[in-house]
Amino acid sequence: MRFRKDAPPRWLRRWCPDEHVQSVAEITPERLQARGISALLLDLDNTITPWRSRQVPPEVAAWVRRMQEAGIQLCFVSNTRNIGRLQWLSEQLGVPYARGPMKPRRAMLRRALKMLGVEAQHAAIVGDQLFTDVWGGNRLGIYTIWVRPMHPREFIGTKVSRQVEKWLLRRLERYQVDENAS
């Protein structure tokens, strides 16, 4: 599902994703390449793995390989404090990571773009949170893909912010684009 990002009131635009998918597996390299996107900045918890987990679901691991084989560059941009887990997943999946001040601050995202050698207009950020992933990407003009959280278990602070997300999403619903309309 896509959104008309120029339509919401100015105060609401910062949290409006370009697109919403149920799982990263719905994102295809062909669709990205058609948009001129050659790099994905990936959130980790509840986007690639369940919260605090080292287990990558098989369909997500296959998706990572498909992106890599298609030449889409990947980089983790995670707010996790467990650096050992981030490094381990980076090694297992062959995906580098950028660290820095936490999203939605721009420094980590800029570092990731620099590591990959791409400009913001050729990148997308994929994540499960409006207040970190989407807002951070929107602040840099990166295409934002908001994904449904893969598991209900998460940080208590995230559980609280999910309530505000629900309120915002009710306001964003009217700006969805019907992709099936001709």
Image (spheres, grey):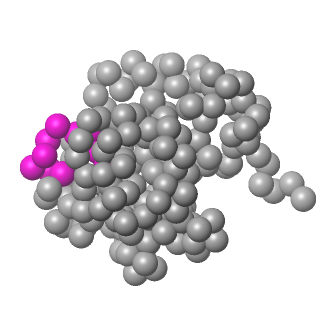
**Residue 34 appears anywhere in the view:** yes
User: Looking at the image, which is closer to me, 135 or 23?
Assistant: 135
Left/right placement of residue 70 relative to residue 3 reads left
Quarter holding the C terminus is bottom right
Report x, y in % for residue 136.
44, 38
Q: Residue furthest bottom?
A: 69
Q: Residue furthest left?
A: 84
Report x, y in % for residue 86.
18, 51
Report x, y in % for residue 15.
56, 32
Residue range corresponding to the magenta coloring: 77-86
Q: Residue at x 34, y 65 (%)?
A: 116
In the depicted structure, whether residue 113 falls above or below residue 171? below
Left/right placement of residue 178 relative to residue 124 reads right
Left/right placement of residue 111 relative to residue 179 reads left
Left/right placement of residue 179 relative to residue 141 reads right
**Residue 45 appears anywhere in the view:** no
In the depicted structure, whether residue 164 falls above or below residue 71? above
Q: Residue at x 37, y 23 (%)?
A: 159
User: Looking at the image, which is closer to me, 161 or 122?
Assistant: 122
Quadrant assignment, res 87: bottom left
